[in-house]
Amino acid sequence: MSFTFIVLTNFYPAANQAMQYAAGLAAKLQARLVLLHVKRASLFDPYVFAGENWRQAELDAEAPTAEAMQELVDRLPVPATVEMATDLLPTLARSLMARYQPALFVLGRPAAEATSADQVSGAALDLLRAAHFPLLVVPVGSTATAPPHQVIIAADAEGFRLDEAGRFAQQLLTNLQCPVTVAHVSEVEDDDACAAALQAVHTSGLVATSQHTDLRCFQHTHAAAGILEAAHTTRAGLLVLVARQRSYLGELFHRSVTARVLEHTTVPVLLLPAVEAPVSETTATDQRPDMGGEAEGLLY
């Protein structure tokens, strides 16, 4: 199976680090890259009233940028192409998915003091994850290298299934051939929930039952802090977060977990779309009432 990664890029450190990490991953998986350069990310098209002539004029003015982007491509160790666009819009994202069928989008997360670059990548992150595309977010300054030598999957006790876009991760974890750890975070010691988390990962097919998987449980009041501790303790080079398609209120309630992880992580994070497992695949642990703690779901 041939994979394609679409990398949101520019000439700033965060995007460059994301591109280098993606290139290392692509080299391991024999994948190709598409370097996507946009000036803005938005839900609304700024040229909807001005017309396509104005959009084309802006693109024509970016000819020097396109040439510089091509120089980046020529220095990469894997096949790559350049896509130039004025705006990352939902329609463009869907068009890219149709044309390239990418395994994931890759974004760099700038440092906290960054301004303009952060506005673009932050808006792109919101747009792409709202559409439930698989996302790889690489924090600037990360010391993790690709391919990773250790992968950690943050999981709760609820069952899930990978959707069509998320199945790339199955092949990814198989091809990486590195140790995989399932980490469960809870406020109290709960061996049953830990075992259910491992079962949920295996039942989903994310990791084959034949592939050795370690189980580590962490006790922490806040889910995000516990996940970050787990990634640090295991020296992970890639952190996988499962993202379920919940109700609107559920999305709002649990969104802080992933937001906090992305804000503070020093490890690249793979946000993996998933859907709820049928009731028949849930465990007894899943039937416990929701006590309102943020550790009850790892959602974005």
Image: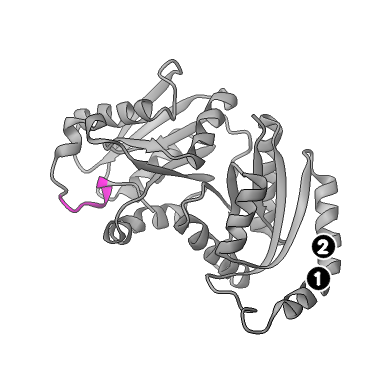
**Location of residue 155 in the rendering, given as x and y in whole percent from the top left corner:** 34, 37
Label 1 neighbourhood size at 10 Å, few (<14), some (14-19), many (20+)?
some
Residue pointed to by mark 2: 66
Residue pointed to by mark 1: 62
Q: Amino acid at mark 2?
A: Ala
Q: Amino acid at mark 1?
A: Glu
Is residue 295 magenta-colored? yes
Label 2 neighbourhood size at 10 Å, few (<14), some (14-19), many (20+)?
some
**Location of residue 211 in the rendering, given as x and y in whole percent from the top left corner:** 46, 18
For the residue labelled by badge 2, is the local secondary structure a helix, a strand or a loop?
helix
* Image quarter of residue 183: top left
Residue 50 as seen in the image, left or right of residue 234:
right
Determine which of the numbered discs, if any, sits on residue 13 in the image: none
Tag 1 near tag 2, CB within 8 Å: yes
* Image quarter of residue 171: top right
Q: Is residue 276 visible?
A: yes
Quarter of the C terminus within the rendering = bottom left
**Location of residue 45 in the rendering, given as x and y in whole percent from the top left corner:** 59, 74
